[in-house]
Image: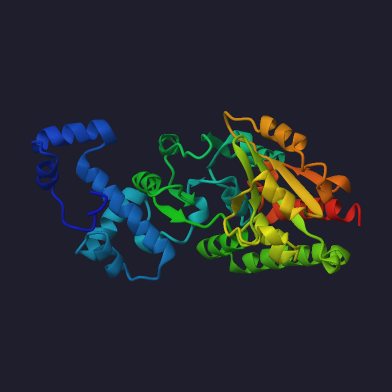
Amino acid sequence: MQEHYNEALTRKQLAQIAGLSPWHYSRKFNEYRGMPPLEFLARYRMYRAQELLLLTSATMQHIAWQVGFEDVHYFSRRFKQLTGVSPRNCGLHPTSRRIVALTPLCADMLIRFGTIPHAVAATPLLLTERQLRQLEEHRIKLLPSPQFHLDTELIARTQPDLIIGAFITEEVRMRLRAIAPIISVDHSDAELLIQQLAALFDKEAEGRSLLAQMQREREAARSKLSPLLQSRATVMALRVEPFGYRYLGGYAKGISELLYRNLGLSLPEPLKAGEAWFNPCSLELLTQANPDYLFVEKRVMEHFDAEAKMNELKQSPGWQRLKAVRLNRVFYVDTRQWVEGYGADGQKMLLDQIVAALTASV
């Protein structure tokens, strides 16, 4: 049904596909979805129509056809019956919708544009103090989700009007499409996320202002790091995980882009081959990299502890020989801020932390 929603479908056809009688099919479907099959199909079509109305400039006739309606007038009537507004007014007041954000970063950006989400799906262990205060201040409901897993059933129980975020897998995306209209955004790139949400909520001027502010913050930080940049000193970010070590590559988004492209810091030569966000790092490779400055992140993970690997690192033969260790230039950072908390507000906090560390011994 989800793959062929734009086609003419009857209960009899659906029952035949399932190998059941129409009556038995409807009863089983109702047990599973909580509504008759054709009601589910109608809602699913309207979710997709809302996405098209919010994200495209397509005509009403074209959108009706795209979601399985040949008669645009009948489409408009059904749309209003199911959503409470006409298709023409669908995109006028997105801020009044019951929105679920799929990441704290997405919620953070929505708040910056004056839209308070009803709820945010997040792993409590990975929330920064700033994010927790933000949720409490704006009375945003926290939907606890295990790390690397999105609890779609919990999201469904909030009965959202709109879901905004990035989707872990195609399977998760398909489950969410049955709950509400979904807007896919890229949370790995804070600036792109700002542009996407600004366009969606008609806040382009505010978006440009926020991007300009973030650019000024980066330029100010880069100016403070000028002596370090001129010296070509190398900076490495090492992640200590329960099962090994990885280093931050120089070509990814988020904190990687901030360190190596925005601020212009130098990655040690032996690490330049790593194209991923975080790349495998042996103790031998760490010794070869021998950075002038070293940020160390002890990975925060549910059900696992990286303390044993951290101890192994510090007791390894090459640790004390590292230039950064000998010169007291090792700085320990928090996963929640460096990885999960980087955004419009988080950028300033990160920059202050980076500048303070790298200029302390210049």
Q: Position of residue 217 (x, y in %)?
A: 77, 62
Q: Residue at x 39, y 58 (%)?
A: 51
Q: Residue at x 30, y 48 (%)?
A: 43
Q: Quadrant of residue 240?
A: top right
Q: Which sits in the foreground, 266 or 167?
A: 266
The number of callouts visible is 0
Q: Which sits in the foreground, 32 or 323?
A: 323
**In the figure, is residue 296 to the left or right of 2?**
right
Q: Position of residue 187 (x, y in %)?
A: 56, 54
Q: Which sits in the foreground, 55 or 94?
A: 55
Q: Position of residue 233 (x, y in %)?
A: 82, 61
Residue 171 sits above or below residue 92 on the image: above
The C terminus lies in quadrant: bottom right
Task: Give the color scheme: rainbow, by chain, secondary structure or one colour.
Answer: rainbow
Q: Quadrant of residue 308?
A: top right
Q: Position of residue 125 (x, y in %)?
A: 62, 34
Q: Residue at x 70, y 43 (%)?
A: 297
Q: Which sits in the foreground, 313 or 192?
A: 313
**In the figure, is residue 117 to the left or right of 334?**
left
